[in-house]
Image (spheres, rainbow, N blue to C red):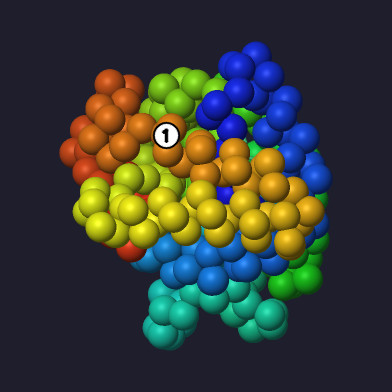
Amino acid sequence: THFGFQNIPENEKEDKVYEVFKNVASSYDLMNDAMSAGVHRLWKDHFIRRLGPTSGTKLLDVAGGTGDIAFRFLKYIDNLNKNESDDLSVPNHIDGFQLHQEDQDLSSSSSSSSDEEDNPMTHHVTVCDINQEMLDVGRQKAESYGICSGMSWLKGNAECLPLEDNQFDAYTIAFGIRNCTHVDKVVEEAYRVLKPGGRFMCLEFSEVKNPLLRSLYDNYSFQVIPVMGQVLARDWKSYQYLVESIRQFPNQEDFSDIIRNAGFRMVSYENLTFGVAAIHSGFKL
Ligand code: SAM
């Protein structure tokens, strides 16, 4: 689930977040679908289309969890190479990834991910998450889809990435930054690891401005979500945290300021579903 813990003491937040995602890792995808009625899939599809990666793009997906953004990235480029429709639904067959496999053969590189990362013509996604359990579920999914190249998994904290400067063309973080203790540090780290010209993109819950829609959304959030949490996961409290953390995360304008303050330029945002979620974007120029 898209949990967040903004309302607990700073020194406890990281441990608490870790514990929650460790516990929910195996049911994470199922619960997301149930909670959002599948809408999170549409947001994520749109997010990747907005990024518009190409066959050379090196992406770092932070707080990448079980790989939802990373799989869409690979599928998007496969579709591009095959001139196919842009259905980004995560594949349940190996075909969707065959071209990527051929790419690798053509480049005559070995299957090691560092060789791929060095090759400017080969796209690659590094999924980074603080939680090994979430990464393990993602890795199993990759195996079941037959993906054996173009992707690597890295355990690391978004606030202090175990990566060198100027490595990536794009940095994504989806429903992850709200869970981090110091949002400004996360964005500064994104700036550091991006190459000049690289793009930062964040998908996160945000603020619904329209008063009528906002009150409908508040009613749904505060009354329905914790009940669903109790019924589906026997966990009222975590779902209450979810709702509270969404309210406490900086709104569209304040988060844009944080991104600007980290050094990004051409900062913009796009509301999704009346601002329930928003995509923020900035460039390292
Ligand atoms: N991006 C995925 C998605 O959209 O489905 C996963 C989002 S999930 C709601 C949030 C993820 O953030 C979890 O996998 C959690 O382990 C990770 N996370 C929380 N704090 C983090 C941190 N400081 N550094 C890296 N990952 C973190």
10 Å neighbourhood of mark 1: few (<14), some, or many (≥20)?
Answer: many
Q: Residue furthest left?
A: 266
Task: Please tell me in which quadrant of the rendered image residue 240 appears.
Answer: top right
Instruction: Mark yes or no: residue 237 visible.
Output: yes
Residue behind mark 1:
249
Q: Is residue 32 left or right of residue 43?
A: right
Q: Is residue 90 left or right of residue 282?
A: right
Q: Nearer the viewer, residue 238 or 149?
A: 238
Q: Residue at x 33, y 53 (%)?
A: 215
> What kind of element bears circle 1?
loop
- From the top left corner, tell me how far across and down residue 40 is, in percent: 50, 63
At label 1, the amino acid type is Phe
Ligand 1 appears in which quadrant?
top right
Task: Please tell me in which quadrant of the rendered image residue 263 appears.
Answer: top left
Task: Please tell me in which quadrant of the rendered image residue 164 appears.
Answer: top right
Q: Is mark 1 within 8 Å of ligand 1?
A: no
